[in-house]
Amino acid sequence: MLVTTLADELRAQKPGARVVSLSLKPRSAIGLAGHGGDAVVWFDEPSRSFVTSTAFAPAPVLDVARFFADDSFEAEQHREWQLAAPADSYQYGDALPGERPDRGWTTLFPHRIAGGAGVDAVFADHWQKSPLSDAYLGRLAARLIDQWQLGQRGTTDFLGVSFSALDMVGHDFGPRSREVEDILINLDATIGALIEHLDRSVGRDRYLLALTSDHGVAVIPEQHGAGRIANEDLGAVVEQALVQTWGAPSQGTYVAASLGGQIYFAEGLFDRWRMSPAAVRAVELALREVPGLARVVRRDQIDRGDAVTRAIARGYVADRSGDLFMVPERGWIIEQRVDGDATTHGTMYDYDARVPLLLLGAGVRPGRSTEAVTPLDIAPTLARAAGVTLSGRDGRPLLP
Ligand SMILES: [Zn+2]
């Protein structure tokens, strides 16, 4: 991480401030916390257990370990994920084209949370991709609010919870699924319980809560006449175009990686390519033949003032981002074929980019705003409420 986070600044500026950050995903728990924290906890796939890192604590945090001992997720093996509401109240049918359920599951409810023997990878997948995982993180948050008196001492504390089941289930079943709708019904209850807990133990006027999401998702392409572009194929198309122009590379390949809709050339190759009109033309012509690919943006041509290049520029980090950025047509997805997902996210189209933003608690009057806002505004909003200064921030405070 190249910058400090809100939680980092809180720890630095408010002596005694506690930072708790919980998620299934490492990048979510770490991203919410920053460079330190009292409990920064995520689900580790290889060991199929909740962990932290020595970057945050020299040993497992005792109160967190106690929670896992008292309320073990392993005990939820063999539970069944059933619809929370009457079947005819859901917007969509239970088995739409293109759904790609996990191993051991069908497209139809109910889904049994179970692997083969014991806590294996299948069980871990099922559990994470069910409402049980969000509810579990909610219970851990409630426990730490009580045990560590979060928000109930003479300073300001930070509690961040990233609920990941919706993303994982969305990848497998798409947004037009009973699975996604049911995850949301359950998540609503989980967040409701957490808010009630905060109201009881901290008091509605003594905390400020922000809710948002990092992205939306595309409808499964097969459900609306769109299609898929595989990163693997994009890399092969560019490689082949360069081989045809320059001949086979003396060693390795011209394309180092094709990931997340970005092509990474081999070290130092971008400048050679950019200076060679024949190579530029060969790559452009080859990519023009890829169905569903709307546009290719070079890294020396981002931020040209239009919506597409501005969106790319916002996610661009020199020396970490790719050399070429692929923009699919509306409704199409760019996927990593090896992931086997039904759908994904990652474009600047409204269904990917528009997310909810809710504020609740101290200083927030009930209401709804039609003003344009962004999740970037959340950190400055919370920082102002906490009396913390952010350096070089994006966004602006939304509350007076
Ligand atoms: Zn995702």
Image (spheres, rainbow, N blue to C red):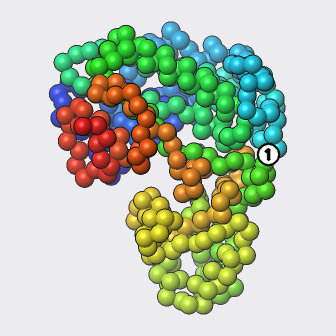
Classify mark 1: residues with Cα within 10 Å, few (<14), some (14-19) or many (20+).
some
Q: Give the quarter of the image for residue 291.
A: bottom right
Percent from the top left, x then y, of residue 179? 70, 31
Query: What residue sits 71% from the left and 39% below the top?
Result: 176
Q: Nearer the viewer, residue 112 or 82?
A: 82
Q: Residue 221: give x, y in percent of width and height.
A: 74, 52
> Quick check: 20 left or right of 278?
left
Q: Residue at x 60, y 90 (%)?
A: 278
Q: Residue 105 location, x and y as percent?
A: 79, 30
Residue depicted at x 41% and y 31%: 367
Kind of element beneath mark 1: loop
Hey, what amino acid is under mark 1? Gly
Q: Quadrant of residue 64?
A: top left
Q: Is the CB of mark 1 within 8 Å of ligand 1?
A: no
The answer to which of 25 and 200 lies nearer the viewer is 200
Ligand 1 picture quarter: top right
Residue at 65% of width from left, 87% of height from top?
Answer: 245
Q: Is residue 135 left or right of residue 100?
A: left
Instruction: Tally the numbered discs.
Output: 1
Q: Is residue 243 visible?
A: no
For the C terminus, the quadrant is top left
Q: Nearer the viewer, residue 84 or 163?
A: 84
Where 215 falls versus 85 (above or below)? below
Instruction: Name the quadrant containing residue 13.
Output: top left
**Viewer-proximal residue among 122 and 249:** 122
For label 1, the residue is 98
Please indicate whether residue 345 sits to the left or right of residue 338 in the image: left
Whether residue 43 is visible, yes or no, is yes
